Amino acid sequence: MSRRLAQESPAATPAASVPAVRAVIALGANLGDRAQAIGAALAALDALPLTTLVAAADLIETVALTLDGPDAAAPAYLNTVALVDTRLAPTVLLGYLHAIEERHGRARGAQVRRWADRTLDLDLIVHGDAVVDSAALTLPHPRAAERDFVLGPWLAVDPAAELPGRGSVAALLERLRDGGGGGAV
């Protein structure tokens, strides 16, 4: 196993001495056999190097969210949230998430419409308390606090969850459901 998996740069600490952090990954699918794709993705997460699947919330069905807002005419999503303990660096974990998506037919690139229907979508929501703002990755996820389909399942598997820089997931979800925007999409 390459110790560089847990590193951002070659000068970083060897993987064996890097402590595991809790990462939160949102999973969703609205095309094909949605439940099968999410189940396979959860198994793939648990098989990642330096990573252990800790918990996954029950699947929920939600209205598709598009750039124009909720779209009840689009195929509905199945969503869940997984908690993993990992020693992988955030960008390395993100690379693995993209590879899992690609194995399930997820296309990326300029020709793909943003927020299009998907066979599988994996979003890295938090990676410990890391704050990252790069072209490739923003942590915590910039829209997590606005998404009932992220906050609800996350709270179900971690009642004490905190979104770094935003506060308690329970309080964020309560605000969202009380009319703070986002709704149950």
Image: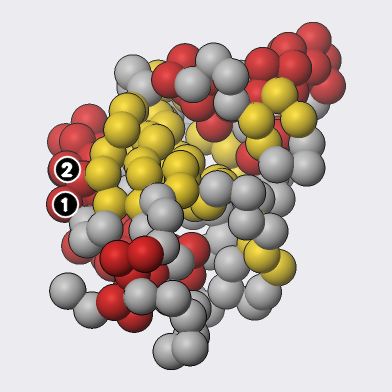
Q: Which amino acid does label 2 sit on?
A: Ala
Q: Residue at x 70, y 68 (%)?
A: 133
Give the alpha-carbon distance from disc 1 to disc 2, as whole Å.
6 Å
Mark nearest the camera among 1 and 2 is 1
Q: Is disc 1 surrounded by few (<14), some (14 to 19) or many (20+) residues within 10 Å? A: few
Q: In this view, does 50 lie above or below 148?
A: below
Of helix, strand and loop, which one carries label 1?
A: helix
For residue 92, say whether it is visible: no
Q: Quadrant of the C terminus?
A: top right
Q: Is disc 2 surrounded by few (<14), some (14 to 19) or many (20+) residues within 10 Å? A: few
Q: Quadrant of the N terminus?
A: bottom left
Q: Residue 43's image quarter?
A: top left
Relative to 90, 98 lies left or right: left
Q: What residue type is labelled 1?
A: Ala
Q: Is residue 55 above or below residue 111?
A: above
Relative depth, front residue between 48 and 141 = 48
Q: Position of residue 74 (x, y in %)?
A: 47, 36
Name the residue that disc number 2 marks: 43
Relative to 2, 89 lies left or right: right
Q: Residue at x 19, y 36 (%)?
A: 39
Q: In this view, does 48 lie above or below 165?
A: below
Of helix, strand and loop, which one carries label 2?
A: helix
Relative depth, front residue between 59 and 46 = 46
Name the residue that disc number 1 marks: 47
Q: Where is residue 21 in the image (x, y as percent from the top left)?
A: 46, 48
Q: Given contact means CB atoms under 8 Å apart, are the residues at marks 1 and 2 in contact?
A: yes
- The residue lying furthest to the front in this view is 17
Q: Where is residue 138 in the image (x, y as percent from the top left)?
A: 65, 62
